[in-house]
Amino acid sequence: MSGFISALVEAWSELRIHKTRILLALVGVAVSVAALASVVGVGQLARESMQANSERQGGREATLGIIGPGGGSGADRLDAAYDALVARYGITYSTRVAMASGAFQFPGGVRNVEINVVDPAYGVVHRVDTTQGGWFAGDDGGRLAPAVVVNEAFYNAAGRPDLTTDPVVGFRGDWATPTVMVGVVADQYPGAGPMAYMLTEGARTTGLATAGGMPVQYKLWVPPENAEELRMAMMADLQAALPGMGVEVYRSDYAAYGDPFAQVQLAIGGIAVLVLLLGAIGLLNISMVTVRYRVREIGIRRSFGATSGRIFAGVLMESVVATTVAGALGVMVAIAVVKNPFIEENIAPGLTDYPAFPLEAALLGMGAAVLVGALAGAIPALVAIRVKVIDAIRF
Amino acid sequence: MADRNTATGPGQPDDGGAAQVLVDLHDVTRTVLLADDEELHILRGVTLRISAGDHLAIVGRSGCGKSTLLNLLGLLDVPTSGSLDFFGRPVGSMSSNARARLRGATVGFVFQQFNLLPGRTALENVAMPLLYAKGRDFWRRNELAMDMLDRVGLASRAGTAQHMLSGGEQQRVAIARALVRRPRLILADEPTGALDVATGQSVMELLEGVAEESGAALVTITHDPNVASRARTQYALQEGALGPAVQLAQVGA
């Protein structure tokens, strides 16, 4: 125990004495670790943003889609079969999705609006984040004045009313129905037109018909590890329940054909490793020079009882302690970079809630710092123990 | 070649087991191979026994093998032939780490050029050997180092950096460092070589006084006859061979 503490004490003392040299070495390592952790952190942020966008489009990882004929009795049978599937497989999050359009009465006049007719679980499956208000609650389907979640363009057209006052916008379908805005989501792209989400029950209340008999899609979020098995089983169930009907079950999510972000992550990882390698070479260079400069000191220590193991541990520990401190500084800089609002807004424009600085980036940075310290310390430490005490004292 | 047991001082008979034998060299040689494969015989058939409390000096001209002999006595080197026993244990069969541990626990070095660690304070330099000690000595290293600095009269300079100390002060710090682990054997290699006469004399008085207080054996290697004459026993090393001893203390008595 005292041997380890003593090696630490010795390492700390060395760092204190050689602070200028250490600082020079540390700047390189701290910058490398900061670059590594920043690259990984920014990469993670970009990946999160891309994933969020992909999930908004196609649903979360392992979302199965079911598509069949639109309209008519076939559609009703498919709807019943879908309900049976959800019950049979105990799917927690599933939703109908239908595209429609309808006219709303805004203060500035009537405008045609794109309407997504969905179930409450759509918000989870398609990762819908509201900027104001909230997504549909389970009992919103029973409202006489159907609830709508609208985009910013719709909200602006409605005069940006206070959502806590249950603002009403008139829907002019087969008959005039008031709708209540309960939440607002960001526009999908700059300059987007007004859009609204409406629940399936609400669409029935308003008499909204799906546009031109466009088929209803069904989305079911299933466990990724069983996605393919469930897809096959559901397909078989639907074919048995709906003989002769062209029904298809497919993966609609971004990960249907493997991880699309793997290449990006690999490239980011490669850059990070190169950055770290440069830092390690710089540290090794300084460490080697330092050990040669300290030959006499090593000889003196050995003449007072330091074993070769202690000398090795001392030089190695000195490097590791130094790079660990540098690593911590580097990670702090990386956090400041990645959590900078400017970086967040530009790297991940699709996100409303930015994720915390990724723990793996911090751990990777610290781990890399320790590893670099150990590697860059091991070579000079080996050189140090090869020093002959007699020659070293006279050096 | 010196007689065996000649290093025992007055009142410390070599027989009867009164004084513990610390180092026992018998017919030791040290040879190195030169670049042209020629052998250089640095030490030839050296026989020497050092017991606790001895004070001896080894004199000789530059290049006669004094430092090599000191290295052997301090376990920094091993003989090419002959036997070297340290506290009764044959050194030839010890690993270098075992020698390092034994050296740290029993030997204190004082060098001509002081060899203090650069950038450290006097206290840090004196405490350095205790980093390689275990238990209480390690945990109380600063306290022990401070006590030792006090003994050499430098307690007030404990926090002074090595380069701010005078030559005499540096050597006193080096003496405190050599003694801080209470060694049984103190090896001083030209301890006054870098000091003026007056400072050298006071340093020798201090070294001898502290060694006597602690009961450690003191071996001084020097080419200065004045320093050598302070020892109770003198040896002369000529061309690698240790000359006959002169029992100065006994003669003086």
Image (spheres, rainbow, N blue to C red):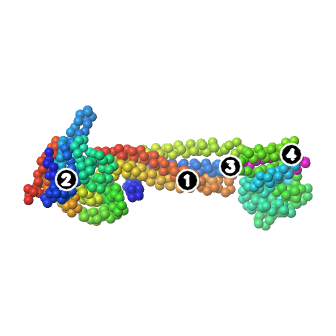
User: Three-letter amino acid code at disc 3?
Assistant: Gln
- Type of the residue with mark 4: Leu
Q: Nearer the viewer, residue A164 or B238?
A: B238
Instruction: Specify the segment rendered in magenta.
Output: A61-76
| Chain under numbered label 4 | A
Q: Which residue is mark 1?
A: A362
Q: Residue at x 39, y 58 (%)?
A: A2
Return the x and y of residue A83 as percentages of the image width and height. Answer: 82, 53
Is the same chain shared between marks 4 and 1? yes
| Residue at which label 3 appears | A51
* Distance (Cα) linking label 2 and label 3: 80 Å
User: Type of residue at label 1?
Assistant: Ala
* Vertical comparison of B35 with B216: above or below: above
* Chain identifier of the residue bearing label 3 in the image: A
Mark 3 lies on a secondary structure that is: helix
Picture coordinates of residue A216 (x, y %)?
83, 49
| Residue lying farthest to the top in this orientation | B36
- Give the chain of mark 1: A
Does A183 appear in magenta? no
**Residue A348 located left or right of residue A134:** left
Q: Nearer the viewer, mark 4 or mark 1?
A: 4
Asked if labels 1 and 4 touch by Cβ distance under 8 angstroms, the answer is no
Q: Chain of mark 2?
A: B
Q: Any mark on residue A242, and which?
A: 4
Q: State the residue position of label 2.
A: B50
What distance separates the C-alpha of mark 3 from that of mark 1?
Answer: 21 Å
Q: Quadrant of residue B207?
A: bottom left
The three-letter code of the residue at mark 2 reads Ile
